[in-house]
Image (cartoon, rainbow, N blue to C red):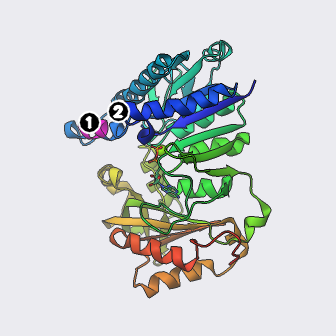
Amino acid sequence: MALTVMKFGGTSVANVERLQKAADRIIKEKETGNQVIVVVSAMGKTTDSLVSMAREISSRPSKREMDVLLSTGEQVTIALLSMVLMERGYSAVSFTGWQAGIKTDAVHESARISSIDTSFIRPKLKEGRIVIVAGFQGVTEDGQITTLGRGGSDASAVALAGAFGARRCEIYTDVTGVFTTDPRYVAKARKLKEISYDEMLELAYLGAGVLHPRSVEYAKNSGIELVVRSSFSEEEGTVIKEEVAMEKARTVRGLAFEKNVTKVTLLGLPNHVNTVSRVFDALAAKHINVDVIVQNVLDEERTSLSFTIDRDVWDETLDVLRTHEKSLAFSQLVSESELAKISIVGSGMASNPGVAARMFHALSEKDIKVKMISTSEIKVSTIIDEKRLTEALETLHDVFRLAEEESVSL
Ligand code: ADP
Ligand code: ASP
Ligand code: MG
């Protein structure tokens, strides 16, 4: 029997009325005769509120306790949605992440799913029950509650789809699909009919919050077709799947961005072969994620190193570097916040020289200063002032003619 995995995000389950609407969709799917697993997020802004409460208590709350706290959000939704379905005459049963057998590694606040023991859910599906699973959470081998990182319910849904052999996973959210960029920032953003796993993966890693990057990674690895669509309208969504050759002509498919970027620079570092590795080893030991990196060798003796981090880990990063000040032997530590990273993404870029040049040209015409650059085969990212972000997005959206239909080849 076919199995459908449906995931509903926070806005789609924000109150009882919305739970009823989600139930309409679930029932419709169940009535087609398919088995159904539903994955849900915490209701509305619940996770944000829990985070702010913790921050009122501590600027650096224990990561283990954060996971215990944040995992409560999804637990509320599963029980309520299950009740809604039961009231409507359907047999439903809720599972927390650990009840569902979702095992993760032990990296609190951004754990990775390592395996799913399907033996708990399978019998319920066989009995014809609708299974509701709390997204975003799992359990380590030794019984610690973990969460998968903000937006992680998408990853739970796709991982479950993979474990139960579903070919398709539907992500119901508050937009009608994946757009050329966040429609909240660029009014002209256009919904894409389809997009390849690789492009979506890059967009997601570069900040397009519509899908958690790991959900795309899992989907690509297991060949699961992802559909992103609105839980509020019947409009067709965006399909994420293997690349369609015809569309390769498009050089830039979308723009992604991240706010809250902070740049840290170490000046006057000794120019030794292991200088850079020692800096990043110290940060990695604290699980601090470093993003764009630029090294400048000044002369035989001295080098400088700049890298970006999320503002949330700014304090912690400075602490780590200062703790190692003597051994790293830098002469100065400077940092700059209120930056943003803006990226252009498209698989056609690999075979199209001059795309980066067009990007920098467009930004310079608007007098938007490029502070750092990083590239890969299918993306170019630049660090700019956060206050120029919307303008930069609109400019690049126009320059790469993203509002125009797919058939245009650039
Ligand atoms: P959910 O709670 O359903 O998981 P999210 O807030 O995590 O919803 O993701 C949906 C949001 O993602 C949209 O409201 C939109 O603002 C944002 N977004 C960012 N980039 C894109 C994009 N390229 N296409 C569509 N939405 C995007
Ligand atoms: N509730 C979590 C969050 O807000 C996970 C999710 O919604 O996917 O980040
Ligand atoms: Mg989300």
Question: Residue at horizontal 73%, vertical 65%?
Answer: 247
Instruction: Say what secondary structure mark 1 lies in.
Output: helix
Rendering coords of residue 400 (x, y %): 58, 76
Q: Is residue 8 visible?
A: yes
How far is the residue under mark 2 from the one under mark 1? Answer: 8 Å
Q: Does the beta carbon of the residue at mark 1 sit less than 8 Å from ligand 2?
A: no
Q: Which residues are magenta?
A: 49-53
Q: Which residue is mark 1?
A: 54
| Tag shown at residue 360 | none
Rendering coords of residue 180 (x, y %): 56, 64
Instruction: Say what secondary structure mark 2 lies in.
Output: helix
In the picture provided, is 368 more to the left or to the right than 234? left
Rendering coords of residue 292 (x, y %): 49, 63
Question: Residue at horizontal 32%, vertical 49%?
Answer: 316
Image quarter of the N terminus? top right
Kind of residue at badge 1: Ala
In the picture provided, is 169 more to the left or to the right than 259? right
